[in-house]
Image (cartoon, rainbow, N blue to C red):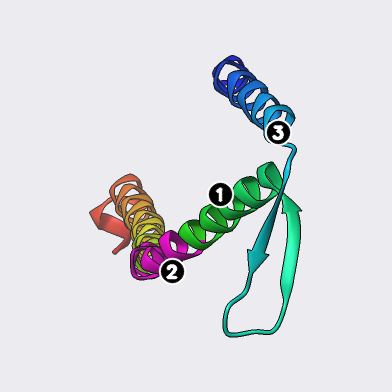
């Protein structure tokens, strides 16, 4: 898995660095409804837009998965409760078999 991460991450990093080196000239960004103008290198503007999009997309995916995570937590608690109940029933069954074995060993005369 680490190899796959390097296999994908290294070329992406190289492309991002090459893009930054090639696009160093400044561009004027006018934030229209606001009275500000910002002059930034083109690579910074593009990479910042990509990063902001990545973060917003990650947040949206995380929020959309909340119902699934909630259901998984509920089912996990239910599975734990069922496992606990099964363990209790095994203990009761074992105790019952031990009592029956003890009754068989003592015989009908002592009843």
Counting from the top left corner in percent of width and height, residue 87 is at 40, 56
Counting from the top left corner in percent of width and height, residue 3 is at 60, 14
Which label lies toward us, 2 or 1? 1
- Asked if the residues shown at circle 2 and circle 1 are in contact, with their CB atoms under 8 angstroms apart, the answer is no
Q: Mark 3 points at which residue?
A: 20
Q: In the image, which disc is placed on residue 101?
A: none
Q: Residues within 10 Å of mark 2 (few under 14, many from 20)?
A: few
Q: What is the CA distance from the residue labelled 3 to the residue labelled 2?
A: 32 Å
In the image, what residue occupies the spot 63% across and 46% down? 47
| Mark 3: secondary structure | helix
- Magenta residues, as a range? 59-73
Q: What is the CA distance from the residue labelled 3 to the residue labelled 1?
A: 13 Å
The answer to whether 14 appears left or right of 74 in the picture is right
Counting from the top left corner in percent of width and height, residue 65 is at 38, 63
Residue 52 in view (yes/no):
yes
Q: Mark 2 points at which residue?
A: 63
Q: In which quarter of the image is the N terminus?
A: top right
Magenta stretch holds residue 64: yes
Q: Name the residue under label 1.
A: 50
Q: Earlier in the sequence, mark 2 or mark 1?
A: 1
- Asked if the residues shown at circle 3 and circle 1 are in contact, with their CB atoms under 8 angstroms apart, the answer is no
Q: Residues within 10 Å of mark 3 (few under 14, many from 20)?
A: some
| Mark 1: secondary structure | helix
Counting from the top left corner in percent of width and height, residue 79 is at 36, 60
Q: How crowded is mark 1: few (under 14 residues within 10 Å), some or many (20 or more)?
A: few
In the image, what residue occupies the spot 28% across and 48% down? 104
Q: Which of 39/14 is in front? A: 39
Q: Which of marks 3 and 1 is nearer the N terminus?
A: 3
Which label lies toward us, 3 or 1? 3
Which label lies toward us, 3 or 2? 3
């Amino acid at each position: 898995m680490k190899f796959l991460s390097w296999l994908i991450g290294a070329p992406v990093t190289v492309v991002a660095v090459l893009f930054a080196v090639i696009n160093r000239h400044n561009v004027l960004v006018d934030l229209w409804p606001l009275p500000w103008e910002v002059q930034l290198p083109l690579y910074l503007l593009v990479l910042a837009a990509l990063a902001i999009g990545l973060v917003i997309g990650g947040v949206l995916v995380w929020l959309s998965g909340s119902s699934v995570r909630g259901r998984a937590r509920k089912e996990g608690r239910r599975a734990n409760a069922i496992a606990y109940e099964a363990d209790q029933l095994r203990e009761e069954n074992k105790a019952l078999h031990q009592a029956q074995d003890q009754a068989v060993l003592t015989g009908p005369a002592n009843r």
